[in-house]
């Protein structure tokens, strides 16, 4: 990635066009140093206040995370540009992206949050699970363009290295992983599951679904059913269940292993 | 993925206008199916109109005529919110169970009610763009007819398509006699009984349902019934969870004394649309709720099945699933 460092030089007409249609971006453009040839052409304004643009060149001056105040060249062509502002782990982020970009790719490739993993990229494995507005979802099947004004929590926003989330600590204690690739998704899923159980949300195997939603004490079968969207090819399932059970019940479970001394 | 224009709809009217005006435009709701299909190059829209922010997510009680009530679930309500809504859990536990048996918690949090109706088949030949498929490319042929068709239809298929509809939710909606409310251009509303919403393949398998370009599902109306306490959604699949049905059965029994007043049975995983087991229902009315009668009803229904090379097992599985679903509808004690 190379930084660009030349002054922008817009014509008077271009400046006015920007001021009128994209005031925020005008400020951005004035603040940043951008090569003239990377200036883009505003082609149209669709109903509902959404802008579509096409680029004069193959590169994008808008392909940037403005929070970092740096300009990165996009690795590929950008088409059908969409601007989104959303919160990631509490911090406001503004991205200008190709309409095809998924939330997963935006997190990993643009915001450098590589904790969320790309397993299958087709909604079959759960490795990309993140928490959006308090609910667990699959970031690989979420368009970043559709994420305007939402709040995302990724594995990077769950616990801190000096103070792990109880689910994270339990995963370590119970050895809830082998290769670790599915683990960020498993943990995001498990954290959301705790809240769902507190809310009394039912699963397919919940008895008497007609009863009022009260906090549910989950059996191992219930935990398995509710975690079925997260696949672990190493087969760490028994240990994942043990970790979730321990946090859910608040009862210390025995560790399945011990270091030899 | 091919490039497409994205825009967020501000209101129902303009969303409908945009999709009606462009034959290659589609609505974007939960995205769980269309995005996957776009990555596979099966769906190729050049414009997506994001309708997720429209105010069509609520669950509302309303009246039909003087005495009968119905509950409307919003077309853009999330599957998980619908399944766990107190009105739905209390009045239509069959629907809650069916929704909760489908996909995963993550996907149910994204997927919408209208999107669930419009999801496309998971036939592996439909997904594989290197293989002929009449649903994907009309006139190219059906690879599944003489291919690996273990997951495919045993009812209502044609030589042009043997795919099955993948939804669990729709199977329950068929058993519940739901109606799909759609809005088209110029605010024109119409209601389609759920049983007429999806199509059998005939010689046009590329058309899954009777929704027209630009029409948006605004709500699904479900009339109240007397079998909420005696209903069950049974799903049989290759693994315990997070898999599509080999066979599923939505069952509801209204019992009066010791005889069956009304039976509702619908099946999933057996046809191009959710399959109403009308013959089994007819057989059961007036009979006693016994295992023998359930078995006889299952026989009556499944004798019309026409299996393919690899799915003959669905006949016996279908029979047993009907019997078991009816047993569980009575005994699962959802009072």
Image: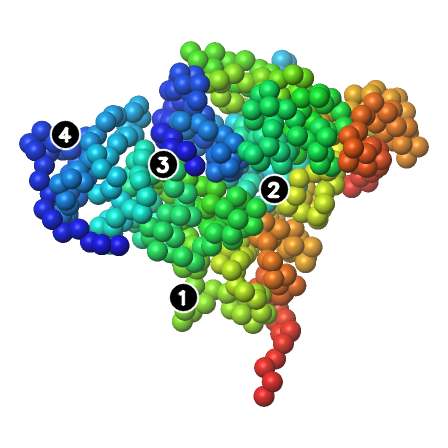
Residue at the image position 40 percent from the left and 71 percent from the top: A162
Q: N-terminal of the two: label 3 or label 1?
A: 3
> Given the image, what chain letter belongs to the residue carrying mark 3?
A
Residue at the image position 41 percent from the left and 69 percent from the top: A161
Query: What is the x, y in percent for residue B279?
Result: 82, 21
Q: Which-is-in-front pick, marks 4 and 2?
A: 4
**How would you rate the neighbour count of disc 4 (Cα within 10 Å): few for under 14, some for 14-19, many for 20 or more?**
some
Q: Which-is-in-front pick, marks 3 and 1?
A: 3
> Given the image, what chain letter belongs to the residue carrying mark 2?
B
Please indicate whether residue A74 sits to the left or right of residue B154 in the image. left
Pointer 4: what residue?
Answer: A17
Pointer 1: what residue?
Answer: A160
- Disc 2 is placed on an element classified as loop
Residue at the image position 77 percent from the left and 30 percent from the top: B308
Q: Which-is-in-front pick, marks 4 and 1?
A: 4
Residue at the image position 57 percent from the left and 46 percent from the top: A124
Q: Residue furthest right?
A: B292
- Disc 3 is placed on an element classified as loop
Find residue B103 and name its label.
2
Please indicate whether residue A82 sits to the left or right of residue B223 in the image. left
- Disc 1 is placed on an element classified as loop
- Whether pointer 2 and pointer 1 mark residues with C-beta atoms closer than 8 Å, the reply is no
A221 or A208: nearer the eye? A221
């Amino acid at each position: 990635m190379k930084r660009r460092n030349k002054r922008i030089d817009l014509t008077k007409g271009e400046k006015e066009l920007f001021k009128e249609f994209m005031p925020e971006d005008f400020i951005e453009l004035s603040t940043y140093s951008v090569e003239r040839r990377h200036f883009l052409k505003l082609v149209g304004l669709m109903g509902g206040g959404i802008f579509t643009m096409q680029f004069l060149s193959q590169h994008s001056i808008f392909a940037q995370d403005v929070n970092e105040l740096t300009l990165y060249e996009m690795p590929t062509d950008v088409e059908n540009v969409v601007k989104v502002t959303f919160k990631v782990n509490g911090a406001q982020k503004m991205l200008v992206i190709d309409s095809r970009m998924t939330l997963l790719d935006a997190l990993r490739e643009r915001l450098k949050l590589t904790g969320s993993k790309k397993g299958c990229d087709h909604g079959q494995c759960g490795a990309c699970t993140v928490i959006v507005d308090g609910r667990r979802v699959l970031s690989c099947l979420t368009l970043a363009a559709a994420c305007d004004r939402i709040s995302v929590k990724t594995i990077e926003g769950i616990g801190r290295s000096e103070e792990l989330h109880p689910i994270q600590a339990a995963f370590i204690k119970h050895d809830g992983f082998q290769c670790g690739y599915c683990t960020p998704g498993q943990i995001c899923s498990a954290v959301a599951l705790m809240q769902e159980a507190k809310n009394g949300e039912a699963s397919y195997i919940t008895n008497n679904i007609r009863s009022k939603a009260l906090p549910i004490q989950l059996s191992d079968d219930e935990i398995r059913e509710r975690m079925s969207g997260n696949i672990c090819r190493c087969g760490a399932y028994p240990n994942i269940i043990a970790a979730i059970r321990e946090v859910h019940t608040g009862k210390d479970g025995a560790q399945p292993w011990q270091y030899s001394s | 993925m091919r490039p497409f224009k994205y825009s967020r709809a501000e209101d129902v009217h303009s969303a409908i206008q945009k999709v009606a005006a462009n034959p290659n435009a589609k609505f974007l709701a939960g995205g769980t199916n269309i995005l996957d299909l776009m990555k596979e190059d099966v769906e190729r829209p050049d414009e997506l109109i994001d309708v997720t922010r429209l105010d069509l997510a609520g669950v509302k009680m309303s009246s039909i005529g003087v005495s009968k009530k119905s509950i409307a679930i919003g077309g853009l309500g999330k599957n998980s919110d619908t399944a766990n809504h107190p009105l739905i859990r209390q009045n239509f536990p069959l629907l809650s169970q069916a929704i909760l048996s489908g996909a995963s918690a993550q996907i149910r949090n994204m997927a919408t009610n209208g999107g669930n109706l419009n999801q496309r088949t998971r036939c592996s030949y439909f997904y594989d763009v290197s293989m002929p498929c009449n649903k994907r490319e009309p006139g190219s042929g059906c690879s599944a007819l003489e291919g690996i068709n273990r997951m495919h239809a045993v009812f209502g298929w044609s030589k042009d398509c043997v795919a099955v509809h993948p939804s669990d939710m729709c199977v329950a909606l068929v058993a519940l006699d739901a109606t799909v409310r759609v809005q088209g251009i110029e605010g024109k509303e119409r209601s389609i009984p759920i049983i007429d919403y999806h199509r059998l393949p005939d010689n046009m398998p590329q058309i899954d349902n009777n929704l027209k370009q630009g029409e948006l599902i605004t709500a699904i109306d479900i009339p109240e019934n007397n079998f909420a306490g005696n209903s069950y959604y049974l799903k049989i699949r290759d693994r315990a969870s997070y898999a599509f049905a080999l066979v599923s059965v939505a069952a509801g029994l209204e019992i009066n004394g010791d005889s069956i007043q009304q039976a509702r049975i619908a099946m999933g995983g057996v046809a191009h649309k959710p399959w109403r087991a009308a013959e089994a229902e007819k057989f059961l009315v007036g009979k006693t709720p016994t295992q023998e009668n359930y078995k006889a009803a299952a026989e009556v229904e499944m004798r019309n099945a026409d299996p393919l090379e690899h799915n003959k097992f669905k006949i016996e599985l279908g029979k047993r699933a009907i019997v078991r679903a009816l047993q569980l509808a009575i005994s699962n004690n959802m009072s």
